[in-house]
Amino acid sequence: MIRLERPFAGTVAGAITKVTGYALGPYQTAVVRIGFAGTWLFFLLRELPHRQEMYGPDGPWNWDMAQQLIANNGAFTALMWSDGNLWFEAVYALAVLSSALLLLGWHTRVMSVLFMIGVLSLQNRSIFMGDGGDNVIHLMATYLVFIRCGQVWSLDARRAARARAGGADAARADGADRVDRVGPALWWVCGLALSVVTFIGELSHGWLLFLWGMLLAHGLWWAVGWRADRSASLGEFRKLLDVVANIAHNAGLLVIMVEACLIYATAGWYKIQGSRWQDGTAVYYPLNLDYFSPWPALSELLSSHGIMVLLVTYGTVAVQVAFPFTLFNRRVKNVLLAAMIVEHSVIAVVLGLPFFSLAMIAADSVFLPTSFLLRVGGWAARARDGAVARLPLSRLRRPDGADNEGRTGGMPEQRVPDGQSAGGPGGKPDEEPTRTAHVGFSP
């Protein structure tokens, strides 16, 4: 009996250590961040000439109608604070700017909150303008607030790496400190704006509690991190805050994975109940609608082959229903994941739904294996270095062969964070946990 309990206790203790001591899935969460921020940014830029008709004062869903609806459903949107055109342009510009900065990973804690505010403000202002992709962005924008999505492939990670490479002594010799000062400044500005909104009384009690809680929690994080090196007690308290942040991150990551599974499971089971999906002709109809035919010749070519329509119809249902169950087998999961990504890519081209497809691919990327993401990161790094090497400024080298930033020439090594292996398992975001670096106010 004792021999059975000890392995079980060790497994439970190891699981608790992973959940509390590490922020899992750094590469997967980075891809999710880049995917959704990029999708929303491209959508806002694409609809920039039509923004007034979609979400602004010139839209068919006018301000009075939106105000009546929001008074009943209690949805959050900053566009209901004023019906002026200048306020609308400011909110739209904030949505574009926060999306771009979140895409780059610049102070992801602040940008994730502003990104959520921008998404909810525009979508809840005109709820009949969206589709399934907008609903996915709506949900994921909320989940990203709790995710430490700037651990890798971000400006935050680059700043952290430079701080570690330079060392605390070298940083202080240059008149700087390990603590980032831009992050706290951003949160002071956000705190001032939140104080004004609170004084005006535009937020509900739930949103006031949430936003003030986020502001105070990260203010505490920065204050403790600033003094953690000078006090042992604060250092221990910082570790406790780190554990809380890791738990929130891993819980949010689990919610994203469950959400993606629910989307496919519900879509697949609803399709099974439809007669057109049962007889294998459902794909034929959208291919012959003018609204979903940006390439009429291509749509006509595909819809003219009955066997292909039948296979695609049944294959779509089978993949969507089976995907949640394949998470227990890595190889089968990767095959179906590739099939779904290809399917969404075809939908983007054939049916003219690029933003819906990009949103779904971004949601699917949470299941991508770490080894594949590391390989893609290596390809991107080599492509970037090749492009930079062709620039005129890249030829200005130091006599010792280092470039202007002090790095030696050649390809950078693709490094895996401490404690993480290169190969990710099938149904988990990461096979081994990774430790996170803390630089200032970007946990």
Image: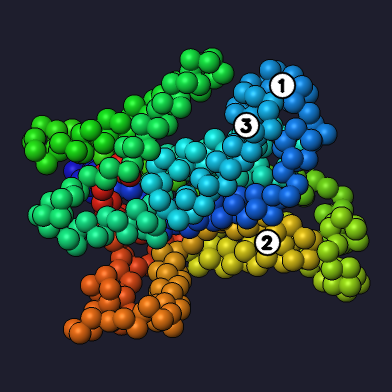
Residue shown at 24% from the left, 60% from the top: 162
Label 3 vs label 2, nearer the camera: 3
Q: CA distance from mark 1 to mark 2?
A: 35 Å
Q: CA distance from mark 1 to mark 3?
A: 16 Å
Q: Choose the circle earlier in sequence order: 1 or 2.
A: 1
Label 1 vs label 2, nearer the camera: 1
Q: Can you identify the residue that label 3 sits on? A: 87
Residue shown at 17% from the left, 61% from the top: 166
Q: Can you identify the residue that label 1 sits on? A: 67
Q: Can you identify the residue that label 2 sits on? A: 344
Q: Choose the circle earlier in sequence order: 1 or 3.
A: 1
Label 1 vs label 3, nearer the camera: 3
Task: Indicate the position of residue 384 as horizontal and vertical percent values.
Answer: 43, 74
Q: Amino acid at mark 3?
A: Trp
Residue shown at 18% from the left, 47% from the top: 177
Q: Is residue 58 left or right of residue 82?
A: right
Task: Indicate the position of residue 117 as horizontal and vertical percent values.
Answer: 54, 35
Q: Amino acid at mark 1?
A: Gln
Q: Amino acid at mark 2?
A: His
